[in-house]
Amino acid sequence: MVNNRIGRVEDTNGPQAWFESLPIITRYWFSATFVITCMGNTGTLNIKSLIFQWGPLKDNFEVWRLLTPFLYLGKFELSTLIGLYFLQEYSKRYELSSGYNTGAGGGTADYVFLLLFGMALTLLSYPLLTGFLMPIFGTTLTYHVLYIWSKRNPTVQVSVWGFPIAALWLPFVLIALSFLMGNFPTDMIHGCAIGHTYYFLVDVVPLVYGKDILHTPQFLINYFGIGVYIPPTAAPPRAPAANTGGTAWNTPGTVNPPQDNNGLRRRNTGGYNWGGSGQVLGSQ
């Protein structure tokens, strides 16, 4: 007799439902990292073609080397599985929360900008650390996001091996554990340093110096809109909401306009003003 209680892939609590529950940027980032890491380890892709090397990039125009180092986590081992878990868990947490507002209301466009900032600074700083870092940056980018999330949510309780700690201390605890396990987590430290640079420019500089340094590029805002991105097939159009100038709040392929416009006042130049001198970006 067949047991009808056996779960299927498409069940509510199955892998497909979990995957579809991931926010859009996390879903694509996790999927690409999982596929590239598997292909690199099974020999489908030559690992040497995935890593960052300036020579082939410059001489042979192998532009994919600007991206694939961030999508490869290394050879199959326990740390790789842990890395995949941290990637989806803290990318999801950041993307689903109200992130730092650098022009798009703390939404998807701002998160993409955060990732691009981390990737650019990783590539720029790597030549200074070639003796300490492997030319693969999947862990670096993951800890870039994890560190910023921990600064954004310092009092949230997380668990490390069953012990609850405040999120503020999570990056440092993970680095300390890596040291205790006999590793030298240069890539983790590198990611945290890049994350702290982003945090300093977005959160500290406006508060202390009254200047907005980092702005999400307009092309990202044009594509993803303000707030959380709604893919074209996510929902049918709905009637325009009040005070939106006739724009449908849930039009597929667009985003909901922010409900609180205090931090998104347009400048005459077409940019955004985050509330004037001294206001912390992304503050609630």
Image: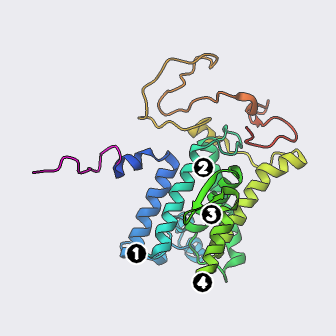
Is 220 magenta? The answer is no
Between the C-alphas of marks 3 and 2, the distance is 12 Å
State if disc 3 and disc 1 touch (CB < 8 Å). no
Q: Quadrant of residue 263?
A: top right
Which type of secondary structure does the marked residue at label 1 adopt? helix
Q: Which of disc 2 and disc 3 is earlier in sequence?
A: 2
Q: Which residue is the site of mark 4? A: 182
- What is the x, y in percent for residue 78? 46, 74
Q: Would residue 3 be counted in the magenta stretch?
A: yes
Residue 123 position, x and y percent, is 65, 67
**Separation of residues labelled 3 and 4 (CA atoms):** 19 Å
Q: Residues within 10 Å of mark 2 (few under 14, many from 20)?
A: many
Segment colored magenta: 1-13
Question: Which residue in the rendered view is the most extreme toward the front?
Answer: 163
Q: Which of pointers 3 and 4 indicates the residue nearer the eye?
A: 4
Mark 2, residue position: 94
Dot 2 or dot 4: first in sequence order is 2
Q: Residue at x 50, y 67 (%)?
A: 82
Please say if 49 is above or below 216: below
Residue 245 locus on image (x, y percent): 62, 17
- The disc at residue 41 is 1
Residue occupying the point 43% across, 66% down: 36
Residue type beneath disc 1: Asn
Name the chief secondary structure element in magenta.
Answer: loop
Q: For the residue carrying disc 4, how many other residues have a C-alpha within 10 Å: few (<14), some (14-19), or many (20+)?
A: few
Q: Amino acid at mark 2?
A: Tyr
Q: Are marks 2 and 4 in contact (CB under 8 Å)?
A: no
Quarter of the rendering containing residue 215: top right
Q: Nearer the viewer, mark 1 or mark 3?
A: 3
Residue shown at the point (57%, 30%) measured from the top left: 256
Residue that carries the numbered disc 3 in the rendered image? 143
Image marks 2 and 1: residues in contact by CB distance under 8 Å: no
